[in-house]
Amino acid sequence: MFTEPEPFCPLGSATGMGNGVREGQVDFKGQDVEPTASAHLPAEGIQEQKKVLNSLMSGALAGAVAKTAVAPLDRTKIMFQVSSKRFSAKEAYRLIYRTYLNEGFWSLWRGNSATMVRVIPYAAIQFCAHEEYKQLLGSYYGFQGKALTPFPRFIAGSLAGTTAAMLTYPLDMVRARMAVTPKEMYSNIVHVFIRISREEGLKTLYRGFTPTILGVIPYAGLSFFTYETLKKLHADHSGKSQPSPPERLLFGACAGLIGQSASYPLDVVRRRMQTAGVMGHTYSSILLTMQEIIREEGLIRGLYKGLSMNWVKGPIAVGISFTTFDLTQILLRKLQHSTNVER
């Protein structure tokens, strides 16, 4: 996925000398001759634009495929997170089965349209930002064209996740509301925005924003750090420059397991604050929300409710996401290369 960018080499850098044209043979008198380097600046800009566009497209597809694959498990996890019911695998199965019987098969994907509206720009921004932050940090620390060291690797992931979360947060709020309410309450995404703005105020769209950002920093940082580190270790020990798709899935699964486990309590707090308006609770701050959850449900059963389901859902989703991004990037580069060769 995260192939380090090749150092830029102007196409005409070697054409000024030894090109078979002797000095003095060509008369430039009276002609407007632009410096050779200027002819290559647009090409550099176009290449950078293509790289960014490839990252955006690959990230969008990665997020959409991953989230759709685990949508029923994700909805079930949110329903437990925002309630005081005790979580168990048996209860989770019963909830999924009851939902299927009462509301139909496709109800298991209720809220997935809102998830797609959120996750497509979120994943596109996150993966693209990660590539850009890697390049910036590589230049800053002197690792241009090489793999980053552990600390910059973690920082690049954290900054990418934070950037994406800040730009798409209201969509996450809407998705959470749709996941825990009956379809009669909110008919579509636009309806959720309208009702929340009218009945609870625009500020509500950013309720739970702080725990989200605090959770994204370790989650995204550790996820990208783990995946990049495993890819580097694989290259060092196997001698192969790129892992196979099954290996990418495994590395992504490990990344998801570590990242989500580290940030899970803040994820529970975020969901409680997001859905407070429709669940009959009032949560004014992160600490008070945590205190209430611990007092009513206990530390482990409250703040880590549904974590075992996340250990199933998370690695699958993150593994699919990283692998899809990597393979799409490789495919797009090959297509661009073949197009350039044909020209």
Image (cartoon, rainbow, N blue to C red):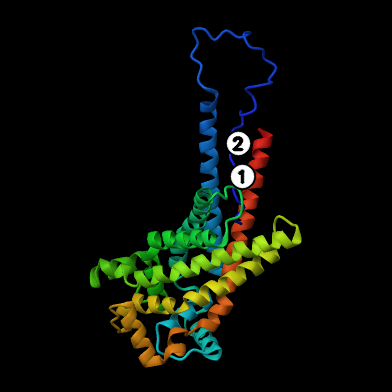
Instruction: Locate residue 165: give its quadrant.
Output: bottom left
Q: Can residue 19 be seen in this view?
A: yes
Residue occupied by mark 1: 6
* Direction from residue 122 to residue 21 in the image, left or right: right
Disc 1 marks a residue whose amino acid type is Glu
Q: 5 left or right of 221?
A: right
Query: Which amino acid is tagged 2?
Result: Cys
Q: In this view, does 166 lie above or below 4?
A: below
176 or 189: which is nearer to us?
Answer: 176
The structure residue drawn at horizontal position 60% and vertical position 61%, both measured from the top left corner, is 228
- The answer to whether residue 185 shows anywhere in this view is no
Q: Residue furthest front?
A: 142
Quadrant for residue 188, please give it.
Answer: bottom left
Q: In which quarter of the image is the N terminus?
A: bottom right
Q: Who's the residue at 60% across and 64% down the image?
A: 227
Residue found 55% across the figure and 91% down from its top: 90
Q: Where is residue 137 in the image (x, y as percent from the top left)?
A: 50, 52
- Using residue 115 as the reference point, say whether residue 26 is left or right of it: right
Q: How crowded is mark 1: few (under 14 residues within 10 Å), some or many (20 or more)?
A: few
Image quarter where the C terminus lies is top right
Would residue 179 appear left or right of 325 to someone viewing this image? left
Secondary structure at badge 2 equals: loop
Q: Nearer the viewer, residue 281 or 146?
A: 146
Residue 22 rendering spot, x and y as whole percentages? 67, 12
Q: Mark 2 points at which residue?
A: 9
Using the image as rendered, state which of residue 99 and residue 145 is in the foreground: 145
The structure residue drawn at horizontal position 42% and vertical position 76%, both measured from the top left corner, is 266
Q: Which of 110 and 318 is in front in this view?
A: 318
Quick check: 95 above or below 252?
below
Mark number for residue 128?
none
- Give the percent coordinates (x, y) of residue 105: 53, 77
Q: Are marks 2 and 1 in contact (CB under 8 Å)?
A: yes
